[in-house]
Image (cartoon, rainbow, N blue to C red):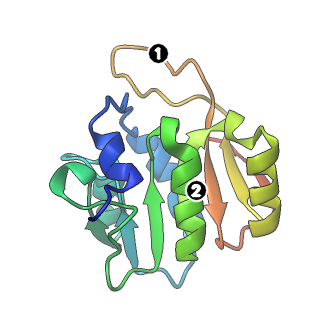
Amino acid sequence: MKTESKFKLMSNNSWGELYTPREAVEMIVPYIPKNVQTIWECTAIDDSKIVDELNHNYYNVIKSHIKDGYDFFEYQPENYDMIITNPPYKYKNEFLERAFELNKPFMFLLPLTTLEGKKRGDLFRKHKIQVLIPNKRFNFLEKKSGAWFQTSWFCYKCNLNNDLNFINI
């Protein structure tokens, strides 16, 4: 009997989805490794700003979402160079672990507090995570002036100049 993956089980719950603002994606474009042509957005919703902005910058984007039957924990496109996504924050540990297993470069938009904790600290040291930290909070909700928490892009195998990169927007 086949068991349901973590992601399928998660899809039955409210994700508390926060949609990525365009300026958050514009910020990372200069930091995408030069050899990247095809990017997998594994939590892409309709009208995804991540997909739109990456397409606008001439990247080929493979989009998938659990609601469309593409389970990040079971599915993987055949040919892609990198993952860029804003995963459900409630499941950041599972997403990070899976992304490290896939061993492809990635950029995940996560709360800055993701740096906290012994388990994630050990994981980040082992895999040499780097972070792009904007100088402001992104506005995830169009009716509000900004998020109540700081988010940053957690990067793996992106060959950034520094581990902590403070970015002016």
Q: Quadrant of residue 60?
A: bottom left
Q: Identify which residue, 10 or 56, lies in the foreground.
A: 10
Q: Identify which residue, 166 or 42, lies in the foreground.
A: 42
Q: Quadrant of residue 22?
A: top left
Label 2 vs 1, first from the N-terminus: 2
Rendered image: mark on residue 96: 2
Mark 2: which amino acid? Answer: Leu
Outermost residue on the front side: it is 1
Q: In the displayed structure, would residue 30 be above or below residue 67?
A: below
Q: Secondary structure at mark 2?
A: helix
Task: From the image, state whether disc 2 or disc 1 is nearer to you.
Answer: 2
What is the crowding at mark 2: few (fewer than 14 residues within 10 Å), some, or many (at least 20)? some
Instruction: State the residue at coordinates (76%, 58%).
Output: 124
Q: CA distance from mark 2 to mark 1?
A: 29 Å
Q: Is residue 81 visible?
A: yes
Q: Mark 1 sits on what residue?
A: 145
Q: Position of residue 52 (x, y in %)?
A: 28, 55
Q: In the displayed structure, would residue 169 be above or below residue 38?
A: above
- Left or right of residue 167: residue 60: left
Instruction: State the residue at coordinates (80%, 66%).
Output: 126
